[in-house]
Image: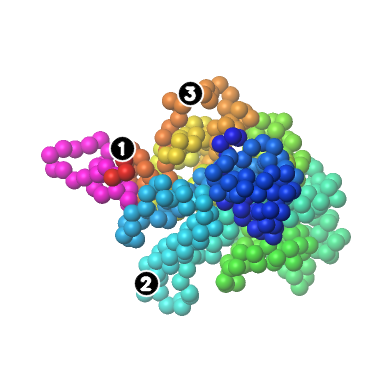
Amino acid sequence: MSKLLVGARLRHLREDRGLSQAELARVLEISPSYLNQIERDRRPLTVPVLLRLTETFGVDPDFFSAHDTARLIAELREALLDDTLGVAVSRTEISELATSLPTVARALIALRRRHRDVVERTTALIGAEDGRELGALPHEQVRDFFYDRQNHIAPLDDAAETLASDLDLAPGDARLKLARALHERHGVRVGTQPVAAAPGELRRYDPRTRVLRLSDQLRAGQQAFQLATQLAFLEHDDLLDDIVATAGFEDDDTRKLARIGLAHYYAGATLMPYARFHAAAEELRYDIERLADRFGVGFEAVCHRLSTLQRPRLRGVPFSFVRVDRAGNMSKRQSATGFHFSRSGGTCPLWNVYEAFTTPGRVLVQIAQMPDGRDYLWIARTVARKRTGYGMPAKTFALGLGCELRHAHRLVYARGLDLSDRALATPIGTGCKTCERVRCPQRAFPPVDRRLDVDENRSTFAPYAVQRRPDG
């Protein structure tokens, strides 16, 4: 704690509350000059001052932790280390920008993200005649919306927890009680429809007749999830709109997708109410399969819910969550940690989330180290979904759930591992184009910020030999 430098975060927090340095110094019982030195990162934050800050602003001590800066540095590095920019930015400059001017850093990341999305969309639409405005696809914008909020939407968590308490939901009767609530509160009748009648549909609601039909192939827990999703639209329509409005989406398709994503968040929070789920996770040492049994939901639903446990003063282990397919496409990515998911150059083939496809249904555990020296514990497993009937296509994904190694002792998956032995860590990285591990034999691309060292008189084990940086 004696080395905790929080100048930028403290300054923005103070300015956001409309306080001068003198006013805040008086509240914290320190001198204005001492506060000025803290805000300029010339003095570290001490425990007594931290405690007074949390009381004054009502924030969790983790607000001043370093993981947000670590992720910001990784995102900024990916945005700036691009050979098309023609500018060489050192690691030291990136770190200083992320630490001292985080708002400017986020603005640069947003601009770079928008530029990349436009270029990719332009390439994809050459010759197309749909006339749509270029930019990020709606699904990508919604994914970023949740990612930027660290996958925690407090108003929906609170509303869902209230509903679960009011209905006294339990895994065995959740479906029946939610169906009864839909009928009694909104006059909605619930029925089922055979797959043949509506191929691929899980839920269909007719506002005119107030009839909700669910696929007859859904299990009880899946039916409960769809019922809770419908309740989100009927009972919290204004709240969904208010949350979506904070994102500034420019088109209706993206706003509608965001509303669906928020309704799904509410449904998961209803079936796994925050306080009860958090207590169970701690009791069971975050055993995903036991939590799935206790709450009557699937493996993926539990992984997703674990990645949302960031309520101030009742936080769970901060997890990152990812879902990928065999081709490496990432359809879900959420992070409450400093872990950064690359948006360019693919992801790392040494990551156990890809190995999971070779052992379907089996939980794999990996200690992994990122280039910045941070160690993580990753849990990976495949999940498969298949429509009933011979010859019907299935879809298979690999799920990854990871936390910083300092939290790993709280997880059942760390049993038998020597968490102090750093030699056990597999060196992984962000996308190959921005990864600093130049000697990695699995590289698919050379790093964009290094020139190739082409020498016909020698060969190397790593596929791309690069020149040394002037700064080392």
Crowd around label 1: few <14 · some 14–19 · many ≥20 (10 Å): some
Q: Which residue is mark 3?
A: 421
Element under disc 3: loop
Nearer mark to the viewer, of 1 and 2: 1
| Contact, mark 1 vs mark 3 (Cβ under 8 Å) | no
| Other-residue count near label 3 (Cα within 10 Å), few / some / many at <14 / 14–19 / ≥20 | few
Which amino acid, mark 2? Ile
311, 146: nearer the viewer: 311
In percent of the image, x 71 and y 40: which residue is there? 51
Q: Would residue 54 be seen by someone viewing this image from the given angle? A: no
Frontmost residue, 81 versus 167: 81
Identify the residue position indicated by label 2 in the image: 126
* Residue 264 position (above or below residue 209): above
Residue 388 location in percent, x, y?
59, 49
Principal SS element in the magenta part?
loop
Q: Quadrant of residue 16?
A: bottom right
Q: Within 10 angstroms of label 2, few (less than 14), some, or many (20 or more) residues? A: few
Q: Is residue 31 left or right of residue 352?
A: right
Q: Residue at x 64, y 37 (%)?
A: 46
Closer to viewer: mark 3 or mark 2 = 3
The disc labelled 3 sits on which kind of residue? Answer: Asp
The residue at the point 77 percent across, 52 percent down is 158
Task: Look at the image and tell me in which quarter the N terminus lies.
Answer: top right
Q: Is residue 137 magenta?
A: no
